[in-house]
Image (cartoon, grey):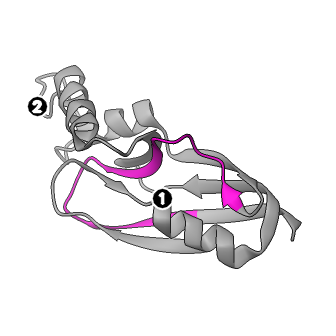
Amino acid sequence: METLSVQTNDQSELIEITDEVRKIVAASGVASGLAHVYVPHTTAAVTINENADPTVVHDILGDLDRLVPRRQRYYQHAEGNSAGHVKSSLIGCCQTVLIEQGRLVLGTWQGIFFCEFDGPRTRRVHVTVAGVMS
């Protein structure tokens, strides 16, 4: 397992980590297999989505804020980050990506994004690579 450190700067943001995951896959020597990306935080997540147009990230964050506003009268969690917990649960804490010919199998416009919902913070992302060595 390799661990990435991600420094976030805003309360909510998506940070592309595709290149960092690619480097881990390349260093592993795995030709065919899986890369598992896991976020061990309850107010963060990981997703795969379009990385070509930054307005997609803007729209995702905007709709998540609309669906799960930061302040709700019915939130009982005392830390004030209930929305971050809900968003993390909606997006999910892990993604698995195929590896073929030593490379991540992603669509032309796909990237892997770390999702921050309670920043700014320093976060961790664990990446495990398994498969057939080249």
Label 2 element class:
loop
Residue 1 visible, this orientation: no
Q: Badge 2, how many Cα within 10 Å: few under 14, some, many 20+?
A: few
Which residue is drawn at the image coordinates 27% and 40% (left, top)? 57
Q: Position of residue 130 (x, y in %)?
A: 79, 62
User: Which is nearer the N-term, disc 2 or disc 1?
Assistant: 1
Q: Position of residue 104 (x, y in %)?
A: 64, 55
Q: Are marks 2 and 1 in contact (CB under 8 Å)?
A: no
Viewer-proximal residue, 79 or 13?
A: 13
User: On the rendered image, what quadrant is the N terminus found in?
Assistant: bottom right
Q: Which residue is mark 2?
A: 71
Is residue 73 highlighted in magenta?
no
Q: Position of residue 44 (x, y in %)?
A: 37, 50
Which residue is drawn at the image coordinates 66% and 68% (left, top)? 25
Q: Which residue is mark 1?
A: 18
Q: Which residues are magenta?
A: 103-126
Give the Cα distance between marks 2 and 1.
32 Å
Question: Which amino acid, by three-letter code, is at mark 1?
Answer: Thr
Q: Position of residue 96 (x, y in %)?
A: 64, 46
Corner quadrant of residue 127: bottom right
User: On the rendered image, what quadrant is the C terminus found in?
Assistant: bottom right
Residue 46 visible, this orientation: yes
Viewer-proximal residue, 74 or 13?
A: 13
Is residue 106 highlighted in magenta?
yes
Which residue is drawn at the image coordinates 49% and 69% (left, top)? 20
Question: Which amino acid, by three-letter code, is at mark 2?
Answer: Arg
Mark 2 vs mark 1: in front:
1
Which residue is drawn at the image coordinates 67% and 78% (left, top)? 27
Q: Badge 1, how many Cα within 10 Å: few under 14, some, many 20+?
A: some
